[in-house]
Image: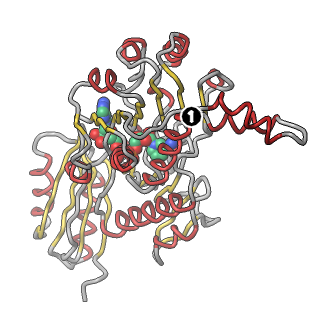
Amino acid sequence: MFNVKTYNNINKVGLQELGDNFQVDAKDSENPDAFIIRSQNLHNVDFPANLKAIARAGAGTNNIPIDKATEKGIVVFNTPGANANAVKEAVLTSLLLASRDYLSANAWANTLRGEDVPKQIEAGKFQFAGSEIYGKTLGVIGLGAIGARVANDARRLGMNVLGYDPYVSIDTAWSISSHVKRIKDLKELFANSDFVTIHVPLTVDTKHTFNNETFSQMKKGVTIINFARVELVDNEALFKAIEDGIIKRYITDFGTEELLNKDKVTVFPHIGGSTAEAELNCAIMASRTIRNFMETGEIKNSVNFPNIQQLLDAPYRITLINKNIPNIVAKISTAVSELGINIDNIINRSKGDYAYTLLDLDESDRVKIENLYKAFKDDKDIISVRLIENKNLG
Ligand SMILES: NC(=O)c1ccc[n+]([C@@H]2O[C@H](COP(=O)([O-])OP(=O)(O)OC[C@H]3O[C@@H](n4cnc5c(N)ncnc54)[C@H](O)[C@@H]3O)[C@@H](O)[C@H]2O)c1
């Protein structure tokens, strides 16, 4: 039986996907095998000794100390795409909100009093005449799960769409409409866009993508939409660009004190992915990912270890998280052969300083297998070891 600890109210129906081999938030379990979290900040949390996996029900993983997890052999997963439709709908809403200033119009209408409100409305509505998004140009930075959907649907709404993503995945690239013009240079995107929306992870490269220099490359009157992360924008530069008339409106899903109650800035309280459907999708995906990893050792959608999938046909599988150093595979194979065990299959893939190894063993003698497990446990180049018995073999 595996133990899972959840944080942040993970959808219960989604958690059922863990199946019968899992206990969730059991009172007597202080040493869980896995966490399933949403936005819980784990930077100051001591990882329990048994912890093998963390699944983030969502896309961004800035709330998890990835390097620390990797060093301890903890595999961190996310649920790419599970809330993409929800965020896409929020971004499309923002495009439309920015084009017509509906929020100010509604606030003004609520200030009116008296029997002649209809007359006051007709007299005052001119101040809220907006423009349409049809025929305007949208620049999309980052064509992943969210950006690709935004780009395709903005096309359907009649916009010209420019897309920039030097690292786009093959799968996503196939899903993007051929009418979305791929741009190689951000300057060109900035120079031609009436609206710019950003859908990239926060990294050292993407921090402050919007800064004094890039704002100066933009069309006057541009609307910026940021449903990705607050740090992608240099707020000082943003305020200056608003003052200089470059930015017509900034709509973001991330509030900091300096952004609140500012003219031409609309802040939403991180609700992009907050729909019942997205929360369910994320919980289902996170639960299936943890179940598959714990029961088979396969890795899919990890942010710190390579993807490895291999059907388990042998009686036993040992999974290793090891240092990515020369001759490690030879050393592992030697340890197996020294115990007279036959290898059915071995896959070793590395990511950075660490690697993950799936070792399928054609051996049913439990004592031999446990000796091998112990040998790996004692090896200083191996960070963590798991033994999985194939219960499906007769
Ligand atoms: N507001 C919310 O509630 C909410 C919800 C989900 C995700 N997000 C944010 O949105 C981001 C995107 O989510 P996603 O599901 O589309 O992720 P994703 O991984 O599917 O897509 C990210 C894309 O960004 C691209 N990219 C990376 N670096 C880039 C760069 N320097 N320039 C251009 N493109 C670059 C990648 O190639 C990838 O295609 C997440 O990282 C997260 O920060 C916010």
Residue nearest the viewer, comparing 337 with 100: 100
Badge 1 crowding class, 10 Å Cα cut-off, few under 14, some 14 to 19, many 20 or more, is some
- Label 1 residue SS: loop
Q: Quadrant of residue 126?
A: top right
Q: Residue at label 1?
A: 254
Asked if one can make out residue 67 in the rendered structure from this viewpoint, the answer is no
Query: What x and y, as percent, mark residue 248?
Result: 52, 23
Q: Is residue 130 above or below residue 77?
A: above
Residue depicted at x 55% and y 71%: 13
Quarter for ligand 1? top left
Residue depicted at x 59% and y 32%: 129
Query: What x and y, as percent, mark residue 269?
Result: 62, 39
Query: What x and y, as percent, mark residue 87?
Result: 48, 48
Q: Is residue 353 above or below residue 29?
A: above
The colour scheme is secondary structure
Ligand 1 within 8 Å of disc 1? The answer is: yes
Q: Amino acid at mark 1?
A: Phe
